[in-house]
C-alpha cells in the first residue's frame, strides 16, 4: 500500500496530516464517550440515531478505532508523496 510512496517535501502536507488526526481523533472520542447520543433539549438528531445504530452493531470501541485509524490513514496518505509529478 505504501511501497511507492516517499515522504513529502511540502511542509503544508504535515499540517494537513495533523488536522486529519485531530479531526478523526476528536470524532472517535466523541463517539467513545457517548456524548454523541445524549439528547439535547429533549430531541436527538437523525445523524446521532444513525451513528448509534452502527455503534450498536460494532461496539463503541471498534467504531472509535475505525474513526481514529481512518484519520491516521488520511494523515499518512497526505504526508507521503506517490512519486507522480502533478502538473
Image (cartoon, rainbow, N blue to C red):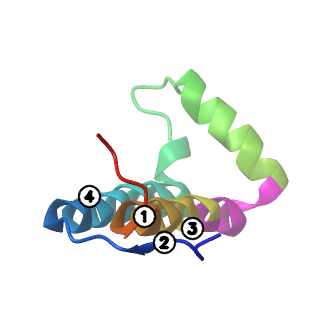
Q: Which residue is mark 3?
A: 69
Q: Which residue is mark 1?
A: 83
Q: Are marks 1 and 4 in contact (CB under 8 Å)?
A: no
As for residue 24 lying within the magenta part, the answer is no
Q: Which residue is mark 4?
A: 16
Q: In the visual, does 7 lie left or right of 48?
A: left
Among the two numbered marks 2 and 4 on one chain, the one whose residue lies closer to the N terminus? 2
Among the two numbered marks 1 and 3 on one chain, the one whose residue lies closer to the N terminus? 3
Residue at (38% x, 60% y) in the render: 78
Q: Are marks 1 and 2 in contact (CB under 8 Å)?
A: yes
Q: To which quarter of the image does residue 3 belong? A: bottom right
Q: CA distance from mark 1 to mark 2?
A: 6 Å
Above or below, 32 against 36 in this view is: below
Q: Which residue is mark 2?
A: 5
Q: CA distance from mark 4 to mark 3?
A: 16 Å
Q: Extreme left residue here?
A: 11
Residue 50's x, y, as percent? 67, 32
Count of numbered tags:
4
As for residue 61 lying within the magenta part, the answer is yes
Amino acid at each position: 500500500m505504501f511501497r511507492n510512496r516517499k515522504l513529502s517535501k511540502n511542509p503544508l502536507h504535515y499540517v494537513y496530516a495533523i488536522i486529519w488526526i485531530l479531526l478523526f481523533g476528536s470524532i472517535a472520542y466523541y463517539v467513545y464517550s457517548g456524548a454523541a447520543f445524549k439528547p439535547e433539549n429533549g430531541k436527538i438528531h437523525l445523524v446521532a440515531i444513525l451513528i448509534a445504530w452502527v455503534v450498536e452493531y460494532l461496539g463503541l470501541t471498534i467504531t472509535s478505532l475505525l474513526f481514529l485509524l481512518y484519520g491516521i490513514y488520511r494523515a499518512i496518505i497526505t504526508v507521503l508523496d506517490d512519486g507522480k509529478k502533478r502538473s
